[in-house]
Amino acid sequence: DAMVIQNPRYQVTQFGKPVTLSCSQTLNHNVMYWYQQKSSQAPKLLFHYYDKDFNNEADTPDNFQSRRPNTSFCFLDIRSPGLGDTAMYLCATSRDQGGLETQYFGPGTRLLVL
Amino acid sequence: AQSVTQPDIHITVSEGASLELRCNYSYGATPYLFWYVQSPGQGLQLLLKYFSGDTLVQGIKGFEAEFKRSQSSFNLRKPSVHWSDAAEYFCAVGAFPTGANNLFFGTGTRLTVIP
């Protein structure tokens, strides 16, 4: 029944140790997004894929990368996590781009960097 | 630049009481406005959205929101709150300069419902 699935739900990693977060969707949507939400802050868009086209936000650190091997899956790779990367990471999808499209969110992965 | 302000960090209401959550936005063009709810351990769920037309928008779970251009506001209301409405509520404005679906969120309002 779940439409946007994120794994793991909780992740603890060490400073500088690469980590990968996973998102999958059963909606067959063209667009997938990754947001970062720090404690008591608004979710902030990191990047999104429109099909295979990758779109990076201007202020997303180079430390954050993403892969989308197929329509269903999208990964967030943090190459060398810092303490400041502790946050909730939200994945979302939409059928298409544009303002009329609703974004569907997963439950998020809570990442703790020690 | 677009931005969203939710002035109330935390609101407590009694079950059965009415609710209004405030949202103010800043955006140069006609905004696309959204309200999302996030229950503990859950993802964000869309409550309602406004693009154009009737300024009073009906959503799911008995929520409604009113777009007031003169006040740059999009406040969320519910006439009678249920205990299951306890959650975090996010207002968002969409910026679609290039067709991408970029949402800019407020910092959220946490709603507590007391018996």
Image: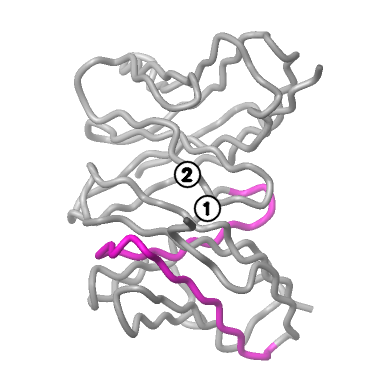
Which residue, given by chain and number where applicable, does mark 2 sit on? Answer: B105
Q: Quick check: B113 above or below B39?
A: above
Using residue B109 as the reference point, say whether residue B66 is left or right of it: left
Give a yes or no on whether discs 2 and 1 share a subunit. no
* Residue A99: quadrant of the picture: top left
Using residue A100 as the reference point, say whether residue A68 is left or right of it: right
Look at the image and tell me in which quarter the C terminus of chain B lies.
Answer: top right
Task: Indicate the position of residue A93 as horizontal and vertical percent values.
Answer: 36, 59
Q: How many marks?
A: 2
SS label for mark 2: strand
Task: Indicate the position of residue B112 as horizontal and vertical percent values.
Answer: 74, 27
Residue for point 29% across, 15% down: B55
Residue for point 65% across, 67% down: A9
Residue for point 57% across, 16% down: B20
Farthest residue, direction front: A1
Q: Quick check: B35 above or below A60?
A: above
Q: Are marks 2 and 1 in contact (CB under 8 Å)?
A: yes
Q: Residues within 10 Å of mark 2 (few under 14, many from 20)?
A: many
SS label for mark 1: loop
Task: Indicate the position of residue B9 as horizontal and vertical percent values.
Answer: 68, 32
The front one of B63 and B109 is B63
Q: Amino acid at mark 1?
A: Pro
Which residue, given by chain and number where applicable, does mark 1 sit on? Answer: A43
The front one of A17 and B7 is A17
Given the image, what chain letter belongs to the residue carrying mark 2?
B
Q: Residues within 10 Å of mark 1 (few under 14, many from 20)?
A: many
Q: Amino acid at mark 2?
A: Phe
